Amino acid sequence: MAQQQVVDWAGSDRPGVRAGAAPEMAIRMVGALLALAIAAVHVADQGGITSFASPDWIGWSYRLIEVGGVLTAVTLLIPWSAWLGWAAALLLGTGPFIAYVLSRSVGLPRDPGDVGNWGYWVGTVSLAVEAALIVLGVTMLVAYRQRSGQRLVIGRLGQFR
């Protein structure tokens, strides 16, 4: 399949620059910042780095999200781990999003106090950031799949095959 050079409407004559396309590294940086924002929101909701949410399983879940946010950000910035980083970003956004909705609708085990508390501003910020990361992750994974022209199969070192 031949690639076609497209010049942007502003008159740029830079070879290989497509009109309206953001550089992939810039998109990865946005994803990394969203992942770090999810980690930061959960640190804030917990009351700081040294605090621990109650019950214990929620506190450990927060720690997992916080560490996962940092690791996802790092993975997104490593050039050879593109699809792996976006898969991690999709999980990082989806897990807390679903947990928040469950905690506000039906409640979580040993933590029924948040049912109906949809107005909590930290939670609202968290939902917005997580939704943005989910949309970006799905978009990038679909783009990688279309670019490869093959089914998404996990190969060695996170490459398509």
Image (tube, rainbow, N blue to C red):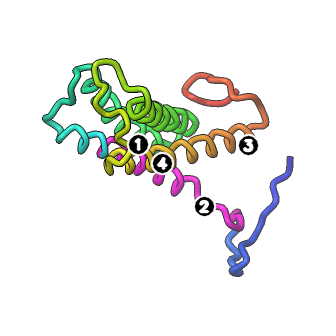
Q: What element carries label 2?
A: loop
Residue at figure coordinates x 58%, y 36% from the top left: 83
Q: Earlier in the sequence, mark 3 or mark 2?
A: 2
Q: How crowded is mark 3: few (under 14 residues within 10 Å), some or many (20 or more)?
A: few
Q: Position of residue 3 (x, y in %)?
A: 81, 54
Residue at figure coordinates x 54%, y 42% from the top left: 134
Q: Name the residue under label 3.
A: 147
Q: Name the residue under label 1.
A: 73
Q: Which of marks 3 and 4 is nearer the N terminus?
A: 4
| Left or right of 82 on screen, residue 6 | right
Which quadrant of the view contains residue 41?
A: top left
The furthest residue to the left: 50
Q: Name the residue under label 4.
A: 31
**Circle nearer the viewer, 4 or 2:** 4
What's under tag 3, amino acid-wise? Arg
User: Which range is magenta?
Assistant: 16-40
Label 4 – label 2 distance at C-alpha: 13 Å
24 part of magenta stretch: yes
Residue nearest the observer in this picture, 22 or 94: 94
